[in-house]
Image (spheres, helix red, strand yellow):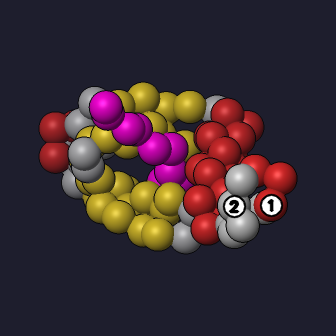
Amino acid sequence: MCLAVPGKILEISGEDDLERRGRVSFGGVTKEVSLAFVPEAKVGDYVVVHVGVALSVVDQEEAEKTLDYFRQMEEAAFEEPSAEHGGG
């Protein structure tokens, strides 16, 4: 299974399209990623990133919705099972 995660571009460096890099925030975690595949991306845009490479630019609403789903899944993973769901 592959997972691509949306993040917001905070900063861009590099002049050549193939060498462009961006500092991208993923809900508070910041990573440097390649922007070679998204030459149109600019600071403030949201990009979908897989293994350190931005694959596409996405709109803010869709990116935030996806990040919210990830937060909900994380919260659900750490909740104690209730008695009605067979958990004690």
Disc number placed over residue 87 in the picture, else none: 2
Q: Nearer the viewer, residue 47 or 29?
A: 29
Is 47 on the left or on the right of 39, as rendered?
Answer: right
Q: Nearer the viewer, residue 80 or 44?
A: 80
Quadrant of residue 75 in the image? bottom right
The secondary element bearing badge 2 is classed as: loop
| Magenta stretch secondary structure, dominant | strand
- Percent of width and height locating residue 47: 47, 40
Q: Amino acid at mark 2?
A: Gly
The secondary element bearing badge 1 is classed as: helix
Q: Are marks 1 and 2 in contact (CB under 8 Å)?
A: yes
Q: Quadrant of the N terminus?
A: top left
Separation of residues labelled 1 and 2 (CA atoms): 5 Å
Is 39 on the left or on the right of 42, as rendered?
Answer: left
Q: Nearer the viewer, residue 45 or 80?
A: 80
Asked if the stretch drawn in magenta spans residue 33, the answer is: no
- Percent of width and height locating residue 71: 64, 57
Quadrant of residue 59 in the image? top right
- Residue 38 seen in render: no
Q: Amino acid at mark 1?
A: Ala
Disc number placed over residue 8 in the picture, else none: none
Query: Which residue lies most toward the right here?
Result: 84
Disc number placed over residue 83 in the picture, else none: 1
Specify start and end residues of the magenta stretch as a single range: 1-11
- Percent of width and height locating residue 74: 59, 59
> Which residue is rendered at x = 69% and y = 61% of the image?
87
Q: Mark 1 packing: few (<14 Cα in 10 Å), some, or many (20+)?
A: few
- Percent of width and height locating residue 45: 56, 44
Asked if the stretch drawn in magenta spans residue 8, the answer is: yes
